[in-house]
Image (cartoon, rainbow, N blue to C red):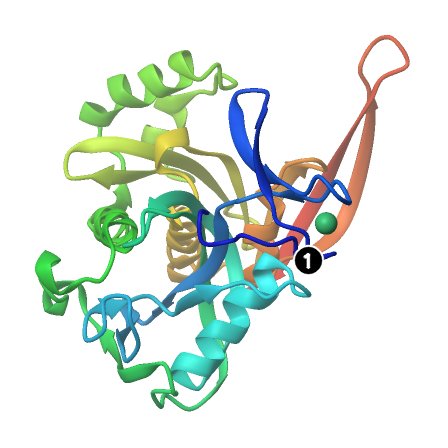
């Protein structure tokens, strides 16, 4: 901050002035205040077939270290646009964003604060080829990831750890032993009660769980009608600490797999219109095929969408 001595607007020497809790550089001539703010950067965690995309940085800071495709935002672009652009420039790949993974504050080598906005993304085009800011760009399986000391930034390492954790989650049919843990999730997170025993034991019902190395972090119910080859997904829930990493999406995929095996042709689900989880279904090819509005007491109305997908 001390290196700036003249007002960029009128050229008058700047003065240090106390403003609230801060001392700032101010121009006594024209009133310009020199704010020093963290610089926002945006990047992507791109996943494809169980692999994650990393680049080896060709520019400082941390030249030669592995990192996510990421970079500082330009003044005229959104965080989403910056994340997509940086990925294209550094890897040659065109990506679409899936979800906001996290926002990290970090301190760079000059002790300036920065903010990294990291998105989960998937490839929609292009060809993998390291760009100007990258010496290399490669896909890594979980067991091939570079060690901590070869990762450029602690924020990127943190996100990679979260990715590995999510990768370790398995999806399976529940057993009687899982019921207390599911009950606990329902109670703790004030989820609607449903007949777990029925889903567990009735031959047309399936109780699915997401199992993170012994801890149940999500569940879903599936009903397959024996008459008309139709299936219904219900009660999908993921523990808040484990959201945004694709666990809900994998639970739905698992339900679709079970349904396919049972020769189901049409799978449906009902979702509240305001539920952001709708996006997960739409990405899996579900379409809105119905809408119900129910009164909820005093002039309130609750809209539920029916989403459908034809299984091949
Ligand atoms: Zn000035």
Task: Left or right? Give the position of 69 relative to 304.
Answer: left
**Residue in front for this viewpoint, 124 or 235:** 124
Q: Nearer the viewer, residue 205 or 87?
A: 87
Q: Residue furthest right?
A: 299
Q: Residue at x 32, y 23 (%)?
A: 182
Crowding at label 1, few (<14), some or many (≥20) Cα neighbours within 10 Å?
few
Residue situated in front as seen by the camera: 7 or 215: 7
Q: Position of residue 203 (x, y in %)?
A: 37, 38
Rendered location of residue 259, percent (x, y): 44, 55
Q: How many marks?
A: 1
Decide: is 4 above or below 81: above
| Residue 84 seen from this side | yes
Q: Secondary structure at mark 1?
A: loop
Does residue 228 show up? no
Callout 1: CB less than 8 Å from ligand 1: yes
Q: Residue at x 38, y 23 (%)?
A: 196
x and y, in percent, of residue 22 in the image: 52, 27
Viewed as shown, does residue 27 lie left or right of 262?
Answer: right
Does residue 278 appear to the left or right of 67 in the view shown? right
Q: Position of residue 128 (x, y in %)?
A: 36, 88
Query: At 40% from the left edge and 12% from the top edge, which residue is drawn?
Result: 187
Q: Residue at x 25, y 17 (%)?
A: 180
- Quadrant in the picture for residue 214: top left
**Residue at image mark 1:** 11
């Amino acid at each position: 901050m001390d290196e700036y001595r003249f007002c960029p607007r009128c050229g008058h020497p700047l003065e240090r002035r106390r403003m609230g809790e801060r001392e700032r550089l101010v121009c006594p001539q024209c009133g310009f205040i020199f704010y020093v703010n963290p610089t926002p950067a945006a990047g992507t965690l791109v996943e494809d077939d169980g692999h994650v995309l990393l680049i080896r940085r060709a520019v400082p800071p941390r030249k030669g270290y592995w990192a996510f495709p990421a970079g500082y935002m330009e003044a005229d672009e959104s965080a989403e646009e910056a994340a997509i652009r940086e990925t294209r420039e550094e890897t040659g790949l065109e990506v679409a964003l899936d979800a906001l993974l996290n926002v990290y504050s970090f301190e760079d080598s000059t002790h300036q604060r920065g903010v990294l906005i990291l998105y989960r993304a998937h490839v929609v085009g292009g060809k993998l080829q390291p760009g100007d800011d990258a010496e290399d760009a490669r896909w890594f399986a979980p067991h091939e990831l570079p060690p901590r000391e070869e990762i450029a930034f602690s924020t990127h390492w943190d996100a990679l750890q979260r990715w590995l954790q999510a990768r370790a989650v398995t999806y399976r049919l529940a057993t009687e032993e899982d019921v207390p843990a599911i009950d606990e999730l329902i109670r703790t997170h004030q989820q609607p009660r449903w007949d777990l025993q029925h889903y567990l034991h009735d031959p047309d019902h399936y109780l699915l769980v997401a199992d993170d190395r012994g801890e149940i972090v999500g569940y879903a119910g599936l009903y397959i009608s024996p008459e008309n080859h139709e299936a219904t997904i219900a009660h999908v829930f993921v523990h808040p600490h484990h959201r945004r990493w694709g666990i809900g999406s994998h639970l739905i995929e698992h339900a679709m797999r079970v349904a396919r095996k049972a020769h189901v042709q049409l799978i449906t689900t009902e979702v509240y219109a305001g539920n952001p989880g709708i996006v997960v279904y739409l990405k899996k090819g579900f379409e809105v095929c119905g809408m119900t509005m129910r009164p909820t007491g005093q002039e309130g109305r609750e809209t539920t969408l029916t989403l459908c997908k034809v299984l091949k």
